[in-house]
Image (spheres, rainbow, N blue to C red):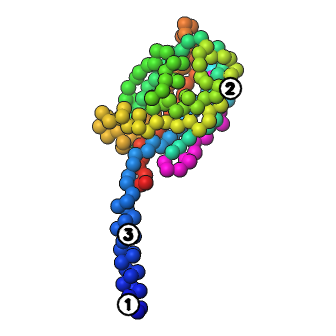
C-alpha cells in the first residue's frame, strides 16, 4: 500500500512539473523606469513660467503593468505648442550610459499628446482635466493610472536591432508658439522586460 502511495505521488509530481512551466509562456512587457521633469531645476516650479511634474509615482499593479500617478502643473498660457524631442539608447538606468539615437519633433504637441494609438497615449489621456490647447496658466492636471502601450512600443522597436536589450530615454521640450518659448520638459525612460503568464 505504501508503494502505491509513493508511486501515485511520483506520478502527480511529474505531471505538475511537466504542466507548470510548459503551460506558462513568456510575454513582453514595458517597464516604466522614469517619468517626470527633465532636470531638478524644473522641479517644484523653481523656474518662473516653467511647467513641472510633482508627486510622481510609478507602481507595478500586477502582471507586468506599471502605472504612473501624480500631477502636471502648467505654468505658461500656451495657445499652440511644438515639441522637439531626443531619444537615447542606454546600457543601464544611468543617463551617463546613454547614447543619442535620434532627434525628432511633434509639430502640434497638444494634438499629438492626446492622439490615440501612440505608445504614449495612455499617459496623456490619463491627465485630468485633459491636456488641451490653449493651455491655461497655473492649471494642475492630475495624472491617474497612466501607462505606456507595450504593443505600440514593440511595433516601433521591431525595426531596431537589439531594441529589447536597451533602456530607452526620451526628453521632450514643450515650446509655446508663436513666441517659441520653452515652458516645460518631460523625461521618460522605459525598458522591455519579460514575465511568464
Start and end of the magenta stretch? 51-64
Is 41 situated above or below 1? above
Marks 1 and 2 in Cβ contact (< 8 Å): no
User: Which residue does the numbered mark 3 point to in the structure image?
Assistant: 17
Q: CA distance from mark 1 to mark 3?
A: 21 Å
Q: Give the number of the disc on residue 128.
A: none
Most extreme residue toward the bottom, as rendered?
1
The secondary element bearing badge 3 is classed as helix
Residue 62 is covered by the magenta coloring: yes
Nearest-to-viewer mark from 2 and 3: 3
Marks 1 and 3 in Cβ contact (< 8 Å): no
The secondary element bearing badge 2 is classed as strand
Q: Nearer the viewer, residue 76 or 159?
A: 159
Task: Check disc 2: other Cα within 10 Å, few if <14, some if 14-19, many if 20+.
Answer: some
Task: Check disc 3: other Cα within 10 Å, few if <14, some if 14-19, many if 20+.
Answer: few
Identify the residue at horizontal 68%, vertical 17% (top origin).
137
Quadrant (top left/top right/bottom left/bottom right) for the C terminus: bottom left
Q: Give the number of the disc on residue 3.
A: 1
The secondary element bearing badge 1 is classed as helix
Is 17 situated above or below 134? below
Find residue 19 and report its image quarter.
bottom left
Marks 2 and 3 in Cβ contact (< 8 Å): no
Residue 179 is covered by the magenta coloring: no
Position in image of residue 24 (x %, y %):
39, 57
Identify the residue at horizontal 58%, vertical 31% (top origin).
126
Nearest-to-viewer mark from 1 and 3: 1
Q: Earlier in the sequence, mark 1 or mark 2?
A: 1
Can the viewer see residue 140? yes
User: Which residue does the numbered mark 2 point to in the structure image?
Assistant: 140
Q: CA distance from mark 2 to mark 3?
A: 53 Å
Position in image of residue 110 (x %, y %):
54, 18
Amino acid at each position: 500500500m505504501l508503494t502505491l502511495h509513493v508511486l501515485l505521488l511520483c506520478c502527480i509530481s511529474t505531471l505538475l512539473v511537466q504542466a507548470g512551466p510548459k503551460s506558462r509562456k513568456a510575454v513582453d512587457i514595458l517597464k516604466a523606469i522614469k517619468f517626470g521633469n527633465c532636470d531638478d531645476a524644473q522641479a517644484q516650479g523653481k523656474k518662473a513660467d516653467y511647467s513641472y511634474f510633482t508627486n510622481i509615482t510609478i507602481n507595478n499593479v500586477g502582471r507586468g503593468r506599471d502605472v504612473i500617478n501624480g500631477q502636471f502643473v502648467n505654468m505658461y498660457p500656451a495657445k499652440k505648442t511644438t515639441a522637439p524631442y531626443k531619444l537615447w539608447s542606454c546600457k543601464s538606468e544611468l543617463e551617463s550610459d546613454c547614447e543619442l539615437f535620434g532627434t525628432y519633433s511633434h509639430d502640434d504637441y497638444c494634438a499629438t499628446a492626446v492622439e490615440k494609438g501612440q505608445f504614449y497615449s495612455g499617459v496623456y489621456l490619463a491627465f485630468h482635466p485633459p491636456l488641451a490647447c490653449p493651455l491655461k496658466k497655473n492649471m494642475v492636471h492630475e495624472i491617474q493610472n497612466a501607462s505606456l502601450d507595450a504593443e505600440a512600443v514593440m511595433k516601433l522597436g521591431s525595426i531596431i536591432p537589439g531594441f529589447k536589450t536597451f533602456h530607452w530615454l526620451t526628453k521632450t521640450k514643450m515650446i509655446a508658439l508663436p513666441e517659441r518659448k520653452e515652458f516645460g520638459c518631460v523625461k521618460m525612460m522605459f525598458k522591455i522586460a519579460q514575465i511568464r503568464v
